[in-house]
Amino acid sequence: MKSEIRKKMTVKRRYLGEIVRLEADRAMLETFEAAFSCYNSFLVYSSFSTEARTDLLIERLLSEGKRVYLPRVEGERLAPVLYGELKKGAFGINEPVGEEYKGEIDVTVVPLLAVNERGYRIGYGKGYYDRFLKGRKTLKVGYGYDFQIEDFTEDEWDEPLDLYLSERGIYTFGK
């Protein structure tokens, strides 16, 4: 079932019109800033292809003097690294060069293909974010479009999000 949802959401994102996408990304940026400006450190995924754009978010956070980390794939795990020099990583995604950050991060912005009404997400199927988030004290924020809310049953190893931010606002999953 998850593989079918992955395919479906990939197609839906691909056919989201350019103007609609731009307006959605701008709305998400404004909502994010209003809701999370009180935090100081952020781990933000580096968007690629048809994912909700995070380059605008990263630029805004940096301009406000926030600490921004990007994930780097190291074997089977993600390592947060302070934003700076970038190079193409394991999946052709820009990843940071530098030392892994070992401290706490206030907010982690998580990519997804779908999210259910209980806050569980479907990613790309490798489990990097589930492993990274397990046991961490960070606010877990999914970042995507409203149509990515989908009904599915999560697996026992899935880590729930705290919030989901889309162009229509923030979902809290009844927490």
Image (spheres, rainbow, N blue to C red):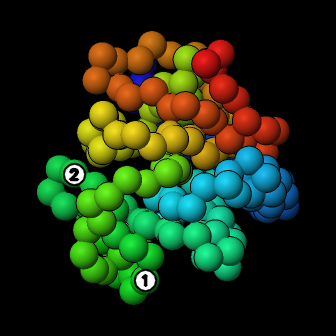
Q: Which residue is depicted at the point 43% across and 54% down? A: 105
In this view, the mark in front (2 or 1): 1
Q: Is residue 57 above or below residue 170?
A: below
**Residue 123, image x and y in percent?**
42, 39
Label 1 environment density (alpha carbons within 10 Å; few <14, some 14–19, many ≥20): few
Q: Which residue is mark 2?
A: 77
Label 2 sits on what residue type? Arg
Label 2 environment density (alpha carbons within 10 Å; few <14, some 14–19, many ≥20): some
Q: Residue furthest left?
A: 75
- What SS does tag 1 mark? loop
Q: Which residue is depicted at the point 46% across and 58% down? A: 43
Q: Nearer the viewer, residue 36 or 113?
A: 36
- Please tell me the numbered disc located at residue 84: 1
Label 1 sits on what residue type? Gly
- What SS does tag 2 mark? strand
Quadrant in which the N terminus appears: top left
Res 63 seen here: yes
**Residue 169, image x and y in percent?**
79, 38
